[in-house]
Image (cartoon, rainbow, N blue to C red):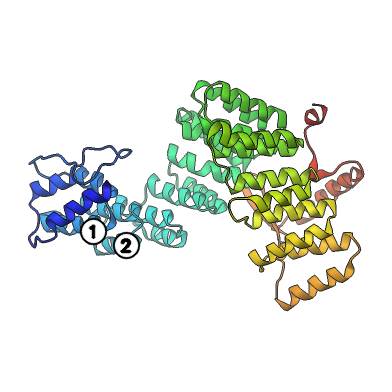
């Protein structure tokens, strides 16, 4: 319907060589629809007053690219070419439509730019994933406001560059710019992913003092931060505080947090309470309950929930759900059932799914299946050294040294090298990065002394506990 209406508009005006009058332009731009319910270009108000800035901003994001450009042309001809607010709206609209080149062109042609103009183009670059371009523009800004900083923090966080998101937030604090609730909701996921608990707690305190905890996005971000940082007790406190305002995101954060930290039965209990209270589960909810089943070794329960996705909730299992089931079966030692499930998937398995099964083969020492799985991985990601290393370790554990030598020759011939692993550690409100055998930190003597102590304690328990498969005792008892 939207395309049909747009076509009618283009047909009606394509033969016109004169610019639209302001009343006519208003008739096109003033769309009687909220942003959540856009309507087509024919559903307009037949008003005759001067076109408003908000008319343009409301209409353009809902139009096809070609029509947006045509309206831009008529817009300039109608006397808005020197209107800063309106030109900024055009930059913003092009950026939101994904037309970044046109947004940048419009931005470059503007003789006068204010902070919102800069914010619009920076947000466009961040939205497209070009954080280098966004940062370059950010550094060139004559002045910035909290929206400028938030655009960068949100961009880094949404593009998986969590360390840079947190670094930008800390820089903003040094500049004494006060974060708003959007900033808080944007930086907390970075804290969650980095395990920056101390910084996250400080942000929570700031949010409470300023009344931002009334915002559900902020509440859910705090909940997720505590959940992912391992402070399940604090996550429960926030979860209970949200109370009747909980949405599916709140339940998901709690369920996943409990599952990841081995509280498998409690995670499933929360799932049942969620259903009783009338909250409809989504894709993420089932990832959480599958994780609970995996950590609890509940294969039958996992199958039951997997089948219920379509039968009870009309949710078609996605790749990540099949991956969870492969992990569940693999950890339970049902390697061939996991392999058969992969072969029956309605979509092509990715490297994560095959890698999960290879890890299970490594744990159970199944050389034959590991070789089959590794062949798929070598085709999907021949550059990944991890797959060669895992298969080599499987050969070594089985005493098949010819296989180890063959893989080493293969890696050397293809110039495949293993990248150094690294870890993030929070201390004193700062995030420190360490690579393998890193001695660059000024206190590395103390660090290695503590690591030796921890390693010794771990070795004392090595014969009785498999640290990769520790599960909640209550799961075994049940």
Residue situated furthest bottom in the rendering: 413
Please name the residue that numbered disc 1 is placed on.
Answer: 69
The image position of residue 272, as x and y in percent, is: 62, 25
Between tags 2 and 1, which lies in front?
Answer: 1
Q: What residue lies at 17% left-to-right and 41% top-to-bottom?
A: 44
Looking at the image, residue 271 sits to the left or right of residue 48; the answer is right
* 310 with respect to 213 (left or right): right
Determine whether the residue tagged by mark 1 lies in a helix, strand or loop. helix
Q: Position of residue 403 (x, y in %)?
A: 84, 69
Q: What element carries label 2?
A: helix
Nearest the viewer among 88 and 360 is: 360
- Which is more N-terminal, label 1 or label 2? 1
Instruction: Work out whether 276 lies above or below 183.
Output: above
**From mark 2 to mark 1, how far is it between C-alphas?**
14 Å
Q: Identify the residue shown where x is 17% and y is 59%.
A: 73
Q: Which residue occupies the foreground of this view, 131 or 443?
A: 131
Answer with left or right where residue 367 lies relative to residue 27: right
Q: Is residue 415 above or below residue 339?
A: below
Q: What's the mark number on residue 104? A: 2
Quarter placement of the C terminus:
top right
Q: Where is residue 362 in the image (x, y as percent from the top left)?
A: 81, 55
């Amino acid at each position: 319907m939207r395309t049909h209406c747009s076509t009618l508009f283009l047909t009606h005006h394509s033969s016109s060589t004169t610019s639209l009058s302001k009343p006519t332009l208003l008739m096109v731009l003033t769309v009687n629809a909220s942003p959540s319910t856009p309507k087509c270009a024919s559903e307009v108000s037949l008003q005759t007053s001067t076109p408003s800035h908000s008319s343009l901003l409301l209409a353009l994001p809902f139009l096809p690219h070609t029509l947006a450009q045509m309206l831009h042309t008529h817009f300039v001809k109608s006397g808005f070419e020197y209107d800063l607010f309106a030109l900024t709206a055009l930059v913003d609209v092009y950026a939101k439509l994904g037309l970044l080149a046109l947004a940048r062109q419009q931005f470059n042609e503007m003789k006068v730019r204010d902070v919102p103009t800069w914010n619009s183009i920076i947000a466009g670059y961040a939205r497209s994933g070009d954080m280098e371009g966004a940062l370059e523009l950010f550094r060139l800004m004559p002045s910035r406001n909290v929206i400028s900083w938030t655009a960068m923090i949100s961009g880094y966080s949404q593009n998986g560059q969590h360390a840079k998101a947190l670094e930008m937030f800390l820089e903003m604090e040094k500049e004494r710019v006060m974060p708003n609730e959007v900033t808080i909701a944007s930086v907390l996921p970075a804290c969650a992913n980095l395990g920056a608990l101390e910084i996250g707690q400080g942000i929570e305190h700031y949010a409470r003092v300023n009344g931002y905890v009334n915002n559900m996005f902020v509440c859910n971000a705090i909940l997720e931060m505590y959940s992912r940082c391992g402070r399940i007790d604090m996550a429960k406190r926030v979860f209970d505080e949200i109370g009747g305002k909980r949405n599916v995101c709140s339940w998901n954060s709690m369920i996943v947090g409990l599952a990841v930290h081995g509280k498998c039965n409690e995670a499933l209990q929360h799932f049942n309470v969620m259903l009783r209270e009338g909250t409809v589960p989504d894709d993420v909810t089932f990832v959480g309950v599958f994780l609970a089943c995996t950590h609890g070794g509940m294969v039958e329960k996992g199958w039951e929930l997997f089948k219920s996705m379509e039968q009870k909730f009309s949710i078609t299992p996605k790749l990540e759900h099949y991956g969870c089931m492969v992990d569940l079966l693999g950890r339970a030692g049902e390697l061939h059932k996991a392999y058969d499930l992969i072969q029956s998937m309605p979509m092509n398995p990715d490297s994560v799914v095959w890698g999960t099964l290879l890890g299970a083969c490594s744990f159970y020492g199944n050389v034959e299946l590991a070789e089959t799985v590794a062949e798929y991985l070598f085709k999907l990601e021949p550059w990944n050294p991890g797959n060669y290393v895992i298969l080599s370790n499987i050969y070594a554990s089985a005493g098949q040294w010819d296989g180890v030598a063959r893989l080493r020759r293969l890696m050397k011939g293809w110039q495949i090298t293993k990248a150094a692993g690294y870890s993030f550690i929070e201390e004193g409100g700062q995030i420190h990065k360490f690579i393998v055998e890193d001695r660059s930190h000024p206190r590395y003597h103390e660090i290695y002394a503590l690591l030796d102590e921890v390693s010794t304690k771990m070795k004392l328990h090595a014969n009785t506990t498999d640290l990769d498969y520790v599960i909640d005792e209550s799961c075994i008892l049940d």
